[in-house]
Amino acid sequence: MRENPSSRPAYLRYLPLIGIGIIAAIGAFTLRDYLSFDALRENREALLAFRDSNYVLTAFGFMAAYMIIVAFSLPGATISTLTGGFLFGLFPGVLFNVLAATLGATVIFQAARWGLGDKLRERMDTSDGMIAKIKQGIDENQWSMLFFLRLAPAVPFFMANLIPAFLGVPLYRFVITTFLGIIPGGLVFTSVGAGLGEVFATGGTPDLGILFEPHILLPILGLSALSLLPVALKKFTGKKDLLK
């Protein structure tokens, strides 16, 4: 007879989240100096030399490290994106960055859903009143809401990983919307990383505030608004999720 997952000891369900929390806490204190712009600047020549001699190994090693950083919520996600652009250029750097970030996000999404997501979803499904209405509204517009979470600059990346897990979003929808939704921001920061050679030569620091420049921010906000268009259309047409 197959064991019912709900009958398993609670600590087994929470173990992945507990592990992520412990590693994230340790990493916040021990890795900050190693995953920084200064560390990249000091080691840039060695990194470039290793890349030139072992391109494929560098690419896979970089993506594995980036995935771990995202999966365990370690400090250094931004510097990792810059490093991808610095080592591999805008392309394939942006592809490596987006793939690694998506894989890392999927790990924490699965851990959260296994540990807490199923129980929270069951409680929301059996609740009534405002909570039930919120849950129903999200369920009917999952594609739009998932894209909005990824595109809206005000939503922290880790929150966009956890919220769908707690609402019972299917894995394939999470992966697709994560991969596509982080491309605009990934392009911006990868392009900044691709120009780090000149920044290092002048002794400067990268301008990470470029994301909030009007010519960058406005198109991203436009995409965020566009992601909610099916929700608005449904209000007028009375149809269910137009992207199902």
Image (spheres, rainbow, N blue to C red):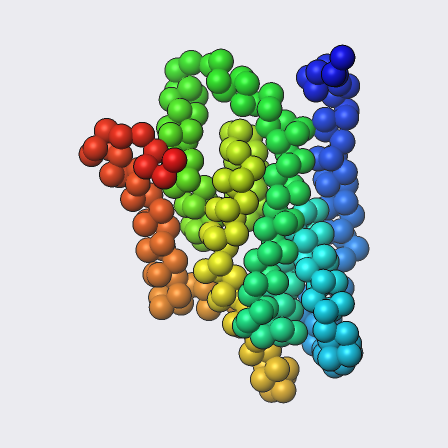
* Rendered location of residue 162, percent (x, y): 57, 38
Residue at the front extreme of this rendering = 1
In the displayed structure image, the side of residue 59 where residue 225 appears, left or right:
left
Please tell me which residue is depicted at 77% across the width and 19% down the height of the picture.
9
The quarter of the picture where the C terminus appears is top left
Q: Nearer the viewer, residue 48 or 43?
A: 48
In the displayed structure image, the side of residue 200 where residue 143 appears, left or right:
left
Q: Nearer the viewer, residue 58 or 46?
A: 58
How many dots with numbers? 0
* Rendered location of residue 82, percent (x, y): 60, 68
In the displayed structure image, the side of residue 135 where residue 101 appears, left or right:
right
Please tell me which residue is depicted at 59% across the width and 51% down the height of the picture.
102
* Rendered location of residue 14, percent (x, y): 72, 28
* Rendered location of residue 78, percent (x, y): 60, 61
Q: Which of 173 and 85 is in front in this view?
A: 173
Compared with 225, 78 (above or below) is below
Compared with 111, 49 (above or below) is below
Is residue 236 in view?
Answer: yes
Is residue 43 in view?
Answer: no
The quarter of the picture where the N terminus appears is top right
Q: Which of 14 and 64 is in front in this view?
A: 64
Please tell me which residue is depicted at 63% across the width and 87% down the height of the picture.
201
Please tell me which residue is depicted at 39% across the width and 61% down the height of the picture.
217
